[in-house]
Image (tube, rainbow, N blue to C red):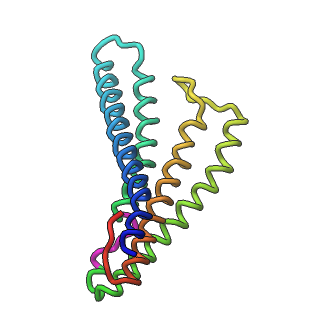
Amino acid sequence: MKDTAEAAVKPLRAAVNFIKKLESALLVIILAVIVAATFFQVLGRFTPIPLKSVFEEAATFAFVWLVMIGGGACAREGTHMTMDFAVSFLPPAARKWFRLLGDLCGCAFGAGIIACAFILIPKIRRAGMVSAVMQLPIWVQNLSLAVGAALILFWSAVNVCRDVYSIVTGKEVQL
């Protein structure tokens, strides 16, 4: 029976690990873009680089994406909606229930933001709004809402499964 359960979980673990690595790689790349854009923006203050505004806007776009994807990483690590000081006084069994409650709130939050993004993005796209300097469609920046919220929802759902398993079996599991 254990071999069957392990075989069923193996593809799930592979998918979760792939998403985790992709998310981490994106965060590193986006952070590198922010550092490079900020460096060239500062360099532009002392040299006649004509693209100072482009670097500022690129850093802003990248920062928004970093925050939203980083929200998913925080949900993955369980660092969102945690009040360690208050929860630390509870017995271990009660802590599991509070962790489950926090992860369920993360699912609700992610789903709510996704719903709002699916209303907002088409309206912005139809309006044809573009950024001031780079002339990039604003909906691309707002797409970060949907991507970040989807990651928050995904990781919170993974954590809910882990929490329920832990409550039912009394064993901790890592996906």
Closer to the camera in the image, 76 or 146: 76
119 lies left or right of 109: right
Closer to the camera in the image, 150 or 35: 150
3 lies left or right of 104: left
Closer to the camera in the image, 93 or 115: 93
| On screen, residue 16 above or below 47 | below
Image quarter hosting the C terminus: bottom left
Residue at 30%, 87% in the rendered image: 90
Q: Position of residue 109 (x, y in %)?
A: 53, 64
Give the residues in magenta. 80-85
Q: Position of residue 40 (x, y in %)?
A: 32, 22
Residue at 41%, 55% in the rendered image: 16
Q: Residue furthest top?
A: 48
Image quarter hosting the N terminus: bottom left
| On screen, residue 155 above or below 85 | above
Identify the image quadrant of residue 88. bottom left
Q: Verify whether residue 83 appears in magenta.
A: yes
Q: Position of residue 94 (x, y in %)?
A: 35, 86
Instruction: Give the overall secondary structure of the magenta segment.
Output: loop
Q: Verify whether residue 174 appears in magenta.
A: no
Q: Where is residue 66 in the image (x, y as percent from the top left)?
A: 40, 43
98 lies left or right of 105: left
Closer to the camera in the image, 42 or 90: 90
